[in-house]
Image: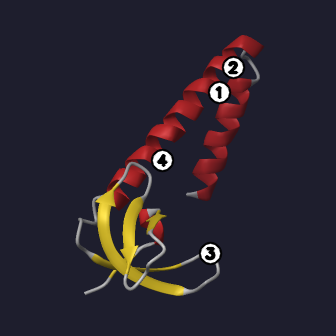
Amino acid sequence: MAAANNELVQQVENLLNKLTQNELILLNKAIVKRIRIMDDLQRLKSNAAFSPGDLVSWHDDRGIYRSGHVLRINTKTISVEEEGDTEGIWRIPASMLYKKT
């Protein structure tokens, strides 16, 4: 598998060496667009695992364990109301959340 990947990378590099600067710029834009689409699809897949009302847990940026209920599924984050929290609503990426049963 690694040998096949190395061969593919070498073929791509050979093709890149034949492109003009303008063609490389266009190719770069196409690559960035594709990466964004892939990120969006992954985010949608992660978000689909949750529904409003689900009990979830996560570790905040200081490593503190927290839990709460999903309020809303946003485009990039999930809005969660922490149990007993009077400070407001957390917006957390789905990749950081764990569903509690």
Residue, disc 4: 39
Q: Residue at x 58, y 49 (%)?
A: 4
Left or right: residue 1 versus residue 23 is left
* Most foreground residue, 54 or 71: 71
The local secondary structure at tag 3 comes to loop
Q: Are marks 1 and 3 in contact (CB under 8 Å)?
A: no
- Disc 3 marks which amino acid? Asp
Image quadrant in which you'd find residue 54? bottom left
Which type of secondary structure does the marked residue at label 2 adopt?
helix
Label 3, label 4: how far apart the Cα atoms are = 22 Å
Marks 4/1: CA–CA distance: 16 Å
| Residue at mark 3 | 61
Dot 3: few (<14), some (14–19), or many (≥20) neighbours within 10 Å?
few
**Residue 22 location (% of width, % of height):** 71, 12
Q: Disc 1 vs disc 3: which is toward the camera?
A: 3
Compare residues 88 and 55 and report the one nearer the observer.
88
For mark 1, what is the residue?
A: 28
Instruction: Check disc 4: other Cα within 10 Å, few if <14, some if 14-19, many if 20+.
Output: few
Which numbered disc flags the more N-terminal residue, 4 or 1?
A: 1
